[in-house]
């Protein structure tokens, strides 16, 4: 697994949307947020385009990703937001070219589709991180989130450090044990949607991270069951569970018709016997940590520590 070159102040960031359109009033603020970090910005056309619920048609979004990787003047690529649509462009990506031009690639949520492909088929580390139009511009962006992000993308070769939760947010143990493996995963919806495609996630011998937002508990149940039936949970050596923002019962006034998320985890994940840590401060939440997808990590539930090894 190759590690992309660290970013430094003065480097040029390609700003793209592989998914949904960016509100026009938000774009200038997102650009300024990146410039305030000391980077130059090349704004992709997808940040300005709209094709219904997409940031331009599939060929435009794919072509822009390809060009950002091909262009030697672009040092890193930030996805401005998530939403929907990244999976649609996967067959249009020039994966051989991208493989030969690894760069810092950052984003999360719908961007999970691209993380899986770049990790597995292009063999380089990517970063599950906050994004310019959805977190960078928020008043509540905190020092923990900024430090985790900037350290990750500006010191990409760093090893032997710990991924620590934000202060006041304790990690919890669902299944005790220890695990070591490559870190993979991201948004549960996108991970489940990869199954049965040429871009299906490979969890064999790896540590699987999962998070999601705005899903009914029965939807979380269905997708975790799908991963279980596909053998993805058994293949993994360990599981990390992040934030489950607004993932609640479909009928909150009738609790007897729903199951708590924790109950779903106990019934679907615990029987795998895999070591599991939960309440990792990562996902659709602030504060949030940046994860180096593709790097080797280890975790110990007794110590509740997650170490990035290489």
Image (cartoon, rainbow, N blue to C red):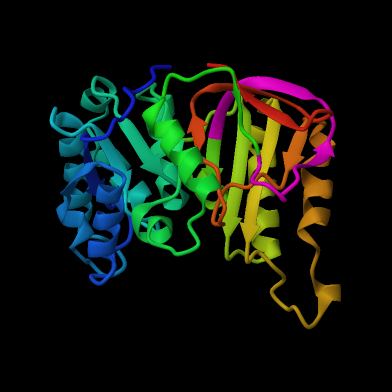
Judging depth in this view, the residue of 74 and 144 nearest the camera is: 144
Question: Quick one: 191 or 292, which is closer to the camera?
Answer: 292
Q: Which corner quadrant of the image does residue 57 belong to? A: bottom left
Percent x, y for residue 64?
Answer: 18, 44
In the displayed structure, does residue 152 sit left or right of residue 47?
right
Q: Is residue 158 left or right of residue 168?
A: left
Residue at 56%, 57% in the rendered image: 285
Magenta residue check for 22: no
Count every numbered label the image shows and give the total.
0
The image shows residue 91, relative to residue 306, as above or below, that is below
- Give the residue displayed 83% in from the left and 55% down from the top: 263
Which quadrant, please, contains the N terminus? Answer: top left
Q: Position of residue 115 (x, y in %)?
A: 42, 37
Give the residue drawn at x 64%, y 46%. Answer: 166
Q: Is residue 182 magenta?
A: yes
**104 in relation to 107, above or below:** above
Q: x, y percentage for residue 167? A: 68, 47
Image position of 85 with respect to 22: above or below: above
Q: Answer left or right for 293 relative to 62.
A: right
Identified at 63% across, 28% down, the residue is 207
Question: Most extreme residue toward the bottom, as rendered?
Answer: 253
| Viewer can see residue 135 | yes
Q: Which residues are magenta?
A: 165-184
Viewer-proximal residue, 105 or 61?
Answer: 105
Asked whether the viewer can see residue 197, the reply is no
Task: Classify residue 110 as left or right of residue 56.
Answer: right
């Amino acid at each position: 697994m190759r590690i992309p070159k660290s970013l430094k102040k003065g480097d040029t960031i390609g700003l793209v949307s592989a998914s949904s359109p960016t509100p026009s009033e938000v774009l200038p603020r997102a650009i300024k947020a990146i410039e305030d970090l000391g980077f130059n910005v090349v704004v992709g056309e997808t940040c300005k385009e709209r094709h219904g619920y997409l940031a331009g048609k599939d060929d435009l979004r794919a072509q822009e990703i390809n060009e950002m990787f091909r262009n030697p003047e672009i040092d890193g690529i930030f996805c401005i937001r998530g939403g929907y649509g990244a999976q649609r462009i996967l067959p249009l990506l020039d994966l051989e070219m991208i493989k030969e031009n690894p760069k810092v690639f950052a984003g999360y949520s719908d961007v999970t589709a691209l993380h899986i492909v770049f990790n597995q088929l292009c063999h380089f580390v990517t970063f599950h991180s906050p994004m310019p139009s959805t977190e960078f511009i928020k008043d509540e962006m905190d020092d923990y989130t900024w430090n985790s992000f900037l350290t990750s993308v500006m010191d990409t070769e760093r090893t032997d450090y710990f991924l620590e939760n934000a202060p006041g947010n304790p990690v919890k143990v669902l299944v005790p044990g220890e695990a070591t493996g490559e870190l993979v995963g991201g948004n549960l919806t996108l991970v489940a949607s990869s199954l049965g495609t040429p871009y299906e996630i490979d969890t064999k011998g790896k540590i699987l991270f999962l998070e999601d937002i705005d899903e009914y508990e029965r939807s979380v149940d269905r997708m975790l069951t799908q991963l279980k039936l596909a053998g993805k949970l058994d293949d993994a050596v360990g599981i990390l569970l992040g934030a489950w923002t607004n993932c609640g019962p479909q009928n909150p006034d009738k609790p007897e018709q729903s199951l708590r998320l924790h109950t779903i985890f106990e019934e679907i994940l615990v029987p795998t016997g895999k070591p599991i840590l939960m309440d990792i401060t990562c996902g659709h939440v602030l504060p949030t940590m940046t994860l180096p997808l593709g790097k080797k990590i280890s975790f110990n539930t007794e110590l509740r520590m997650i170490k990035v090894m290489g």
